[in-house]
Image: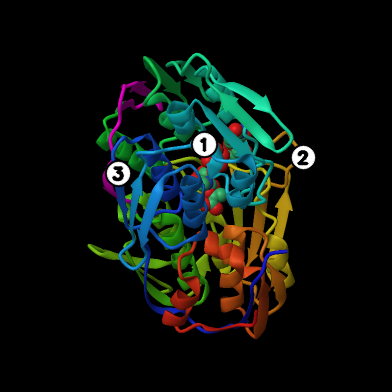
């Protein structure tokens, strides 16, 4: 069971200003990239979240010296003396993160071997690593499944290859990039993911000396180089966190200025926000989001890879949609099992049905299988406080929003999961005038 119990007195608009720093889904990968550099790297705009702790721990185990100035958000990483770590230590430090799989390519280059423990991550589907392993094999790695995890070696080095992804997976694209930059020869990656966090990782690797070109058709070409150096980089802002606070403003009839939010990474979200009836104002230093009064409007939305509507924006938005007038449909096409969080919303008074069918308008790869991956939300339904348990990171933040929007008192159990991806969320709630008390 995950720790942390929060009492929330709901029905009060969130009002005020918060700051988002670097993206959870970029920062750990940029930290892994530092392993490839002969000289030290500096990463700026680093948030204090648990995933950063986990990766710092893993890198330290491998001999990387790390210094983190939490206030300034500056992380210095020196990978000049990388060394092997003990399997048991890696296993103990990996926590629930999926990042260890991305250490494989860089460690194979630096040490000729890598070990990854059984991986965690949020409970939002099977989350297999088959793409990762087949990519690493294609570069020439030998994969040996053992009792505690997977051990990889590269007896003949790593060589450029052609990879055709069956689905534009974020992790598989990053795996390819982090391995190909130092592999011998050319690598062609077809069907790549092109999320802004991936483009930021490409920028990091280019600063290190990598040669990477991204074509218009989701093909990425990488020319392997013999040596990479350290980088200095400012992480792009966290567009998932920004959108989460935006949805919280909408669901609570509030008004929140998200300092650091960046328009061009959020275009699709902003279109949906406007269609639902939310208001926003883009400024140089962030975006203000608010509920302008009147009824919210129902809509149909499908999650997808970039430039589509992100799967991680879905759960906070669903809470706002419980307050929209009419029937909304949300079709989740990235993960097969990402509506588990809706059962708590039903308990709080929301009217939500989940279906196996693809209801959003297009057929997805989950359509002919047994997954409840479409949701129909009927609103507006007043929410009332309840005792609920956080299921995963994004679902958990949605529960928090629902509790803040609901009339009465809620007790939200397991809120420590939210620390994985939302920096200082307790002090941000206080800054937004939320009535929350930590009970445990
Ligand atoms: N997939 C496979 N095999 C694989 C890898 C992925 O079948 O080997 C499938 C997954 O099961 C899923 C789909 O491909 O159905 C997409 O997964 P992807 O690899 O793109 O996701 P990821 O790299 O594991 C990252 C983020 C997620 C985010 C997704 C999609 C990190 C650490 N995680 O996961 O973020 O939802 O991309 O954008 O970057 C979160 O922040 O809460 C979160 C879950």
Q: Residue at x 37, y 41 (%)?
A: 79
State the extent of the magenta-drawn residues as a range.
Answer: 212-236
- The circle drawn on residue 40 is 3
Q: Is residue 114 left or right of residue 258?
A: right
Please provide percent x and percent y for residue 183: 40, 21
Residue 371 in the image: state x and y as whole percent. Answer: 73, 43
Q: Earlier in the sequence, mark 2 or mark 3?
A: 3
- The structure residue drawn at horizontal position 53% and vertical position 44%, both measured from the top left corner, is 99
Marks 1/2: CA distance? Answer: 42 Å
| 378 or 28, nearer to the observer | 28
Residue 144: image location, x then y, percent? 66, 25
Q: Residue tagged by mark 1?
A: 84
Q: Secondary structure at mark 2?
A: loop
Asked if residue 104 is among those painted magenta in the image, a careful observer would answer no
**Label 2 neighbour load within 10 Å: few <14, some 14-19, many 20+:** few
Residue tagged by mark 2? 370
User: Looking at the image, do the residues carrying marks 1 and 3 touch, with CB atoms under 8 Å apart?
Assistant: no
Sequence-first tag of 1 and 2: 1
As for residue 219 lying within the magenta part, the answer is yes
Q: Nearer the viewer, mark 2 or mark 3?
A: 3
Q: What element does badge 1 sit on? A: loop
């Amino acid at each position: 069971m995950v720790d942390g119990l929060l009492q929330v007195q709901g029905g009060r608009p969130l009002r005020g200003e918060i700051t988002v720093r670097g993206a959870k889904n970029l920062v750990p990968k940029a930290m892994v990239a530092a392993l490839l550099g002969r000289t030290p790297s500096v990463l700026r705009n680093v948030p204090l979240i648990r995933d950063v702790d986990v990766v710092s721990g893993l890198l330290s185990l491998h001999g990387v010296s790390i210094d983190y100035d939490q206030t300034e958000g500056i992380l210095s990483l020196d990978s000049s003396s990388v060394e092997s770590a003990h399997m048991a230590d890696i296993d103990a430090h990996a926590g629930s993160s999926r990042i260890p799989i991305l250490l494989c390519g860089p460690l194979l280059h630096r040490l000729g071997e890598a070990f990854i423990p059984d991986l965690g991550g949020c409970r939002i589907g099977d989350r297999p690593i088959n793409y990762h392993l087949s990519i690493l094999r294609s570069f020439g790695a030998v994969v040996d499944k053992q009792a505690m995890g997977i051990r990889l070696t590269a007896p003949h080095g790593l060589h450029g290859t052609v990879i055709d992804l069956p689905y534009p997976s974020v992790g598989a694209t990053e795996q390819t990039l982090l391995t190909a930059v130092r592999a011998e020869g050319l690598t062609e990656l077809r069907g790549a993911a092109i999320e802004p966090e991936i483009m930021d990782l490409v920028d990091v690797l280019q600063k290190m000396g990598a040669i990477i070109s991204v074509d218009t058709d989701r093909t990425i070409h990488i020319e392997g180089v013999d040596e990479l150096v350290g980088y200095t980089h400012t992480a792009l802002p966290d567009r998932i966190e920004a959108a989460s606070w935006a949805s919280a403003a909408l669901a609570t009839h509030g008004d929140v200025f998200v300092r650091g939010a960046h328009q061009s990474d959020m275009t699709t979200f902003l279109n949906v926000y406007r269609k639902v009836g939310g208001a926003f104002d883009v400024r140089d230093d962030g975006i203000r989001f608010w509920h302008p009064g009147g009824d919210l409007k129902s809509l149909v939305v499908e999650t997808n890879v970039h430039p589509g509507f992100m799967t991680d924006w879905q759960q906070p938005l669903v809470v706002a949609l419980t307050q929209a007038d009419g029937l909304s449909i949300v079709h989740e096409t990235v993960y097969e099992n990402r509506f588990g969080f809706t059962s708590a919303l039903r308990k709080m008074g929301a009217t939500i049905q989940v279906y196996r069918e693809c209801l959003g308008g297009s057929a997805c790869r989950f359509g002919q299988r047994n997954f409840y991956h479409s949701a129909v939300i009927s609103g507006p339904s007043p929410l009332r406080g309840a005792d609920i348990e956080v299921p995963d990171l994004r679902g958990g933040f949605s529960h928090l929003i629902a509790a803040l929007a609901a009339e009465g008192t809620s007790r939200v159990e397991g809120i420590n999961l939210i620390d994985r991806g939302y920096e200082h969320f307790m002090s941000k709630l206080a800054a937004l005038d939320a009535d929350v008390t930590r009970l445990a």
